[in-house]
Image (spheres, rainbow, N blue to C red):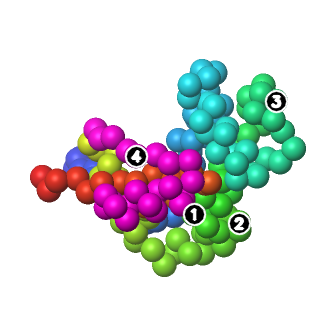
Amino acid sequence: MPIKKSIPRSPVSSAASLVLREARRLHRSATCATLASALPILRRVLASDSLPGLSLPELYRQRDQVQRKHLLRTLAREAGFASWEAYRQALDELAPEQLQHFELVYRQAGHLNCWFSSLDEARAYVASHGGRLLPVGQQAVVLVDLPAV
C-alpha cells in the first residue's frame, strides 16, 4: 500500500484567510475568562461600534455573546471599511503581505512599538523620527523597520 506524503500548506494562502485567522484568534481571546486577554479585544469591539449599547463591564459579563461576525466587523472598521462585506471584497484584490494590520514579520520577532492615543500624535512622531504609521481604531502605532536578517 503506497504511503501518501502530506504536502505542507502555505500558512497563509490569501489575504482573506489571514483576516479570518486573525478573527478566530481574537474571538478566542475575547471569550477567554482572563481579564488581560479579553479586555483589549472587547475594547476594540466597542470602539468599532460592532456591539453598540454596551459598556465594557457589561460586555465582559456577556462576552459569550461575542460572535466571530462581530470581530470581522471590528477588523473591517479598523481597516477603514464600513462593513465586513466591503472589506471581504477588497481582500480579494490584496496579497497577504499588503495587509498592514497583520504584520507577520513583526509577530515573529520581539520588538517595541510606539503607541499613540491619536493619529495626529503618531504623524508628528513619524515626521521627526521616521517609521510606518499604522492606524488602530482611534489610536495609532508607529512601526520601525526591523534590520534585515
Query: Where, by quadrant of the figure, is residue 40 drawn?
Result: top right
Question: In front of the other: label 2 or label 1?
Answer: 1
Q: Which residue is mark 2?
A: 83
Q: Nearer the viewer, mark 1 or mark 4?
A: 4
| Among numbered discs 1 and 3, the one appearing first in the sequence | 3
Instruction: State the extent of the magenta-drawn residues as a range.
Output: 110-132
Q: Residue at x 61, y 27 (%)?
A: 32
Mark 1 sits on what residue?
A: 79
In primary-sequence order, the first of circles 1 and 4 is 1
Give the camera-side residue of 111 and 71. 111
- Of the image marks 4 and 2, the number of the one nearer the N terminus: 2
Residue 10 located left or right of residue 68: left
Please name the amino acid that badge 3 sits on: Glu
Is residue 129 within the magenta segment? yes
For label 4, the SS is strand
Is residue 130 visible in the rendered structure shown here?
A: yes
Q: Amino acid at mark 1?
A: Ala
Name the residue rendered at 62%, 23% in the picture.
Answer: 35
Quickly name the residue at label 3: 58
Q: Position of residue 16 (x, y in %)?
A: 51, 64
Whole-Å distance between the Cαs marked 3 and 2? 24 Å
* Camera-side mark, 3 or 4: 4
Q: CA distance from mark 4 to mark 2?
A: 28 Å
